[in-house]
Image (cartoon, rainbow, N blue to C red):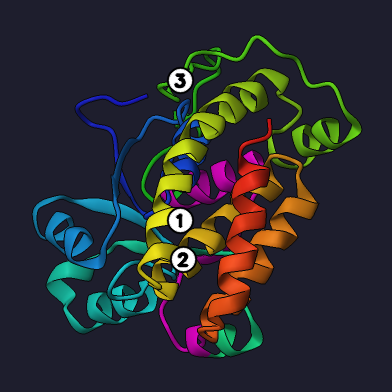
Amino acid sequence: MTSSAAPCVLLVEDDSSIARFVSMALDQLPIELLTCTTVPAALALLQHRDVKLVITDLMLPGESGISLVQRMAADPGLRRDTLVAVFSAGLTPAVKEQLQGLDLWRVLSKPIAVQELEACVQDALALRAPASAATSAAPVDVSGAEPSTSSPNSAADALAIATHFGGDAHLFTTYRAACLQQFAADVQTGDAAAQAADWGALRRLAHSLATVLLTLGRPDDSLMARALEDAAAINDASACRSGWDRLRQRLAQP
C-alpha cells in the first residue's frame, strides 16, 4: 500500500521468491517498497531516493550486503538518516563478528515470520511517523501468481502457517503457489550453473532455496539445499552435481 507521501523502504534481495514474501508481508503497511538485486543498483537508488529503511541480504551477486553497509557508512550523502537492517540466513558466528561495529538498525534471520518483518518496518518508521500509520485493510494478493485452490493439508503446512505466516492460511497458499511457479525457473538456473560448473551461482541458488523451502514447511528439502550450499562453498564438483540432481527432483514435487 503506497501513497505519494509514503516513506520508502528498499529491499536488496536477489531471490525473487524471498522478495515476493517480503512484498506480501508488508503490503498492508503505508510504505513504498522498492526492490533491487545488487549493491550497485541499491547505491543508485540511494542517490536518487529518500530511503528511510534498507533491508539487505548478505549473499548477493557481486558485492555483498556487508559491502553495501560499509559503503553507506563511508558516504554520508548516501547514508543520511537511513536505517539499515541485515536480512540473512547465513548468520554464522563469523558473520556476526563481521557485523559488529557496523551501524545496523536490526539483524533479521531467515526464514522470518510475517509479524517480525512487519514489526521491524513499523518500529523503524515509528521514529519518523505516528504508530497509527499501519492500516487494518484486508490482505491483498501481490504475488503475481494465480491463487492456489488447494488448502493446507498437512501438519507441516499448519506449522509453517503458524510459524511464518501469522496463522494466515490464505497468505501461505498464495505464496506457495507463486513459489511453485518460480521453482521451474530455479531449476533452469541450477541446471545452467551445474553445466557450467559455476559453483558460486549454485551456492547462491541453494542458499536462497534453503530459506524458501523452510518457509514453506519443507525442512528436509531445506536441509538438502543447505548441504548443496556447503558443497558449492568448497567447490566439491561431485557433491554439487549429485546434490543438485536430488534437489531439482524435490523442486518438481508440490
* Mark 1 closeness class: few <14, some 14–19, many ≥20 residues within 10 Å: many
Residue stretch rendered in magenta on the structure = 98-125
Residue shown at 49% from the left, 46% from the top: 18
**Does 112 appear above or below 195?**
above
Q: Are marks 1 and 2 in contact (CB under 8 Å)?
A: yes
**Secondary structure under the numbered disc 3 in the rendered image:** loop
**Does 101 appear above or below 81?**
below
Name the residue carrying label 1: 190
Q: CA distance from mark 1 to mark 3?
A: 22 Å
Residue at the far top: name it: 149
- Tell me if residue 118 is in the magenta stretch: yes
Q: CA distance from mark 1 to mark 2?
A: 6 Å
How many numbered marks does the figure carry?
3
Which is more foreground, mark 1 or mark 3? 1
Q: Residue 167: which disc?
A: none
Identify which residue, 156 or 191, lies in the foreground: 191
* Mark 3 closeness class: few <14, some 14–19, many ≥20 residues within 10 Å: some
- For the residue marked with disc 3, what is the amino acid? Ala
Query: In the figure, is residue 122 to the left or right of 90?
Result: left
Q: Residue 202: which disc?
A: 2
- Tell me if residue 103 is in the magenta stretch: yes
Image position, residue 41 (x, y; %): 18, 59
- For the residue marked with disc 2, what is the amino acid? Leu
> Which picture quadrant has residue 39?
bottom left
Q: CA distance from mark 3 to mark 2?
A: 25 Å
Q: Quadrant of the N terminus?
A: top left
Residue shown at 48% from the left, 16% from the top: 140
Q: Residue 145: which disc?
A: 3
**Does 90 appear above or below 139?**
below
Q: Earlier in the sequence, mark 3 or mark 2?
A: 3
**Secondary structure under the numbered disc 2 in the rendered image:** helix
Identify which residue, 194 or 48, lies in the foreground: 194
